[in-house]
Amino acid sequence: MEKREQLYAGKAKSVFTTDDPDHLILLFRNDTSAFDGKKLDQLDRKGMVNNKFNAFIMEKLQAAGIPTHFVKRLSDNESLVKRMEMMPIECVVRNLAAGGLCRRLGVEEGIELNPPTFELFLKNDALGDPMINESYVETFGWAKPEQLAKAKELTFAVNTVLKQLFADAGILLVDYKLEFGVFKDEVILGDEFSPDGCRLWDAATRKKLDKDRFRQGLGDVVEAYEEVGKRLGINFDA
Ligand code: CDP
């Protein structure tokens, strides 16, 4: 697969076309951002760690029957993915209260959410990724109702797989954000799954092991990502 031109550069990843119109290359950079790009930094090794973390998780999800855009890891910082038509929405599931939910509703951080909540946000940095709902998605044509229904079903299927995977490593999957796209008429999981897009707490101490370490200036950001990965059995030296 030959890398061609850059199609898009996001806050932490860049996307390249290839000589095959059905495939793209994702480049995981060391750039880190929070608060809609208002806080930026470069963190050594982060691109490599997130690329390997994402590859491991995507393979686990595929093995569990969840379709994803992930094809294979190409190098330390690059992975090959299927080229999809992205839905401009973010699907968030929460198992424990944190972040935006606590800010919006004034609930205490860490309370269990039973059943887990499902939220939708519009992918739009200029608007600060506003919260939306299923009726907005249909009215504004961001996805067809049956595509949204599939994305929601897959978002919860991911919860079943990953809650257990992290629990077995002594980690709580607090919440996470997923993005979906359409590839040859099928709704499949896109983007990435890494500690940049979820909250992970040590089950015993509730120590934060995710991007909140960067957002809140707690330090040892990539070290925490690597600790999670190692507990899952990821070999970052391979
Ligand atoms: O991150 P923040 O507190 O602003 O928002 P949230 O609604 O509490 O985020 C829920 C989950 O989605 C967290 O794991 C975030 O890291 C993730 N998220 C994301 O990856 N990208 C976004 N644009 C928004 C949320």
Image: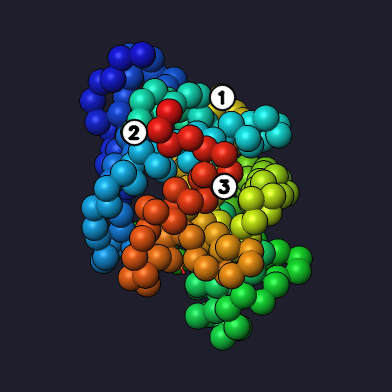
Circles 3 and 1 in contact, beta carbons < 8 Å: no
Q: Quadrant of residue 4?
A: top left
Report the amino acid beneath label 1.
Lys
Residue in the foreground of this view, choosing between 228 and 63: 228
Say which label, 3 or 2, has the lower sequence index: 2
**Residue drawn at (51%, 30%) of the image:** 70
Specify the label residue 48 is tagged with.
none
Report the amino acid beneath label 2.
Asn
Q: Looking at the picture, how far across and down is residue 131, in whole percent?
A: 50, 66
Circles 2 and 1 in contact, beta carbons < 8 Å: no
Query: Whole-Å distance between the Cαs marked 3 and 1?
Result: 36 Å
Q: Looking at the picture, how far across and down is residue 64, in whole percent?
A: 71, 34
Secondary element at tag 1 = loop
Report the amino acid beneath label 3.
Arg
Q: For mark 2, does the 10 Å Cα neighbourhood hold few (<14), some (14 to 19), or many (20 or more) residues?
A: many
Secondary element at tag 3 = helix
**Residue drawn at (48%, 51%) of the image:** 227
Q: Looking at the picture, how far across and down is residue 182, in whole percent?
A: 54, 34
Q: Is residue 167 visible?
A: yes
Pointer 2 residue:
77
Q: Is residue 142 visible?
A: no
In the displayed image of the protein, which residue is found farthest to the right? Answer: 115
Q: Looking at the picture, how far across and down is residue 176, in whole percent?
A: 55, 56
Query: Whole-Å distance between the Cαs marked 3 and 2?
Result: 21 Å
Specify the label residue 231 is tagged with.
3
Say which label, 2 or 1, has the lower sequence index: 2
In the rendered structure, the answer to whether residue 1 lies left or right of residue 135 reads left
Pointer 1 residue:
184
The residue at label 2 has a CB less than 8 Å from ligand 1: no
Quadrant position of the C terminus in the picture: top left
Q: Quadrant of residue 151?
A: top right
The residue at label 1 has a CB less than 8 Å from ligand 1: no
